[in-house]
């Protein structure tokens, strides 16, 4: 125990005697770990934000009618026994209604499944928005607003007005922000909506919807499901889409296949719908890790170089230590202990720096029309980043100190003293 304490005292003496070099090495670790924490917190926070924007409004499974061409053509039935090859060009999709057949029983069965958190119907209307002589093409989606809020955070995208207004007042609409801007409309005004059949409806604007995607906000609006069915001139069983949210998103692919097989409909899972987005998110995360780890490695090399200089400058001290009874192992642990001191001090300061800058970024205002639900820069305070930073600091400084320490362990004190 006394020997260990002596090694600690000698290590501290060496570090204090070369305070500038020690400070530079510790700051290298500090900035390396700080930059790692800041970058990972910000990049994963950004990825989480973007994923949330997509996942919040994208159902895990979308159910709608098939529009694929009929696989079996009449000639296949007529000449089923023939070995001739049949070539049929320009096959048209099978004529099917846009609404889902037996949608209400399907919806009820989906809601009863244990894997399903919820399922909500939609009725899609192609319309013209009218304001004076202005006429814009668009889409009105009939929804059950309470379920949309519960399952898909729908209220987060209503930037003005009351999200439940379409439920309380039948002839009201949540108008796309882009449409409102083009037609110079605001909450409380009326907008004329004309269906493809020519029927016109005067709707009160209960709120403005803004997804952050201009191509969506310029065409899409929302009304109550019953109002949409009235615009279409259809009955209460008219449902063009069913949006399903699952307890576990990983079940989306098998669930979509099950729905296709059971109900003879098309089912699009979220993995397929957002494949490109997921790839981009993975690449951003990979780049973040690569850059951050590189910063930590660079800090480790800085410690290695400084400890190498320590050894050359402390040749006489090493010779004296060995001559007075210290073993090569003792000398090795003196320099490893110095490296660990640098790593721990630099790691602690790096955590403080990383957390402090992360908090500063998190409280920096960030407002853009593209992201209406975001008010500050996104930061992820995952403890794993801080733990990983400290672990890497300790490991890298140990390795950076171990290699020079082995060199010091093998120094022959007789040759040093003879050289003097």
Image (spheres, grey):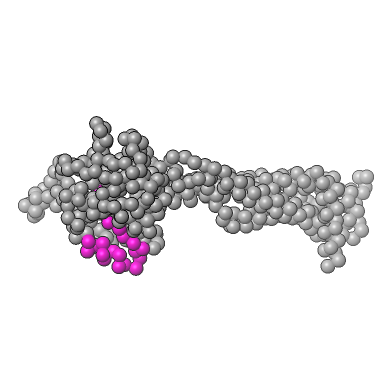
Q: Is residue 43 visible?
A: no
Q: Nearer the viewer, residue 314 or 351?
A: 351
Which image quarter holds the N terminus?
A: bottom right
Q: What residue range appears in magenta? A: 104-124
Against 57, residue 254 (above or below) is below
Residue 164: % across, % down: 35, 54
Residue drawn at x 57%, y 46% is: 363
- Residue ranking furthest to the left: 78
In the picture, residue 201 is in which quadrant? top left
Q: Is residue 415 left or right of residue 410?
A: right
Against 136, residue 152 (above or below) is below
Residue drawn at x 66%, y 55% is: 390
Q: Is residue 49 visible?
A: yes
Q: Is residue 345 magenta?
A: no
Residue 291: % across, % down: 58, 44
Q: Is residue 75 left or right of residue 126?
A: left
């Amino acid at each position: 125990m006394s020997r260990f304490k002596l090694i600690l005292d000698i290590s501290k003496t060496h570090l204090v005697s070369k305070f500038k070099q020690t400070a530079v090495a510790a700051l290298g670790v500090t900035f390396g770990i700080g930059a790692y924490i800041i970058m990972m917190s910000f990049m994963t926070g950004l990825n989480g934000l973007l994923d949330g924007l997509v996942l919040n409004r994208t159902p895990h499974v979308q159910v709608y009618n098939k529009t694929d061409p009929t696989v079996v053509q009449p000639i296949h039935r007529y000449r089923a026994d023939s070995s001739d090859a049949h070539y049929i060009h320009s096959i048209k999709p099978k004529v099917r209604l846009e609404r889902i057949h037996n949608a209400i029983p399907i919806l009820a069965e989906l809601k009863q499944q244990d894997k399903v958190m919820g399922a909500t119907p939609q009725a899609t209307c192609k319309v013209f928005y009218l304001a004076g002589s202005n006429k814009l093409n668009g889409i009105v989606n009939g929804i059950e607003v309470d379920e949309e809020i519960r399952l898909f955070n729908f209220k987060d995208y209503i930037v003005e007005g009351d999200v439940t207004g379409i439920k309380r007042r039948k002839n009201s609409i949540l108008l796309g922000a882009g449409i409102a801007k083009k037609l110079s409309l605001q909450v409380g005004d009326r907008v004329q909506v004309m269906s493809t059949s020519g029927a016109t409806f005067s709707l009160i604007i209960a709120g403005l919807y803004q997804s952050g995607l201009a191509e969506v906000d310029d065409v899409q609006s929302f009304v109550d499901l019953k109002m949409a069915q009235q615009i279409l001139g259809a009955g209460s069983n008219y449902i063009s889409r069913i949006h399903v949210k699952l307890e576990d998103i990983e079940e989306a692919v098998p669930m979509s296949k099950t729905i296709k097989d059971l109900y003879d409909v098309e089912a699009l899972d979220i993995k397929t719908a957002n494949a490109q987005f997921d790839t981009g998110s993975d690449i951003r995360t990979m780049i973040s890790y690569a850059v951050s780890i590189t910063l930590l490695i660079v800090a480790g090399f800085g410690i290695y170089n400084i400890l190498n200089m320590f050894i050359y400058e402390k040749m006489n001290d090493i010779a004296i230590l060995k001559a007075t009874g210290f073993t090569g192992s003792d000398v090795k642990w003196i320099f490893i202990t110095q490296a660990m001191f640098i790593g721990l001090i630099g790691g602690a300061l790096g955590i403080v720096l990383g957390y402090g800058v992360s908090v500063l970024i998190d409280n920096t205002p960030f407002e853009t029309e593209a992201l209406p639900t975001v008010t500050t820069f996104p930061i992820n305070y995952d403890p794993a980043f801080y733990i990983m930073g400290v672990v890497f600091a300790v490991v890298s400084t140990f390795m950076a100190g171990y290699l020079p320490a082995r060199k010091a362990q093998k120094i022959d004190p007789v040759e040093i003293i003879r050289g003097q």
